[in-house]
Image: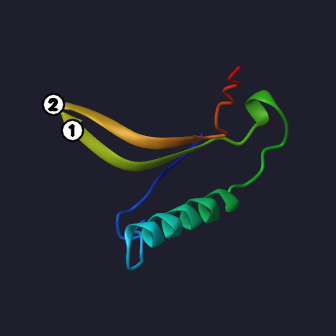
Amino acid sequence: MEIIKIEDNYFKGIGNNDIEKRNNLRKLIVDLFGEEKPGTGRGEKTSRYEYIFEDIYYKNDKYNIYIDRPANLHNRI
């Protein structure tokens, strides 16, 4: 698994309002996913990525806000 730590100066929403900033952040995420190298098969040969966006400290414990790729598929009925 390749772990990619997103630097704050790279991952900033740019825009005049919250909607523009959110849309620009989405575009950055899609661009990051587009740079992923494909795997060579299934299972262990699948390419795996973890993007860490933020570290959070709570009561002396460290937590990460992250996105795993490939994402898990959740079917809802």
Work out whether residue 15 or residue 3 is closer to the camera in this orientation and state it: 15
Where 66 sits versus 14, above or below?
A: above
Give residue 60's mark: 2
Left or right of 24? Residue 8 is left
Q: Which residue is mark 1?
A: 57
Work out whether residue 4 or residue 28 is closer to the camera in this orientation and state it: 28
The crowd level at tag 2 (other Cα within 10 Å; few <14, some 14-19, many 20+) is few
Quadrant of residue 58 within the rendered picture: top left
Give residue 47's mark: none
On the image, the x and y values in percent for residue 18 come to 39, 67
Q: Is disc 1 placed on a helix, strand or loop?
A: strand
Where 26 sits versus 75, above or below?
A: below
Tell me what residue is drawn at x 38 percent, y 73 percent: 17
Q: Amino acid at mark 2?
A: Asn
Tell me what residue is drawn at x 84 percent, y 43 percent: 40
Work out whether residue 27 or residue 44 is closer to the camera in this orientation and state it: 27
Tell me what residue is drawn at x 36 percent, y 70 percent: 9
- Residue lying at the far right in this picture: please name it: 41
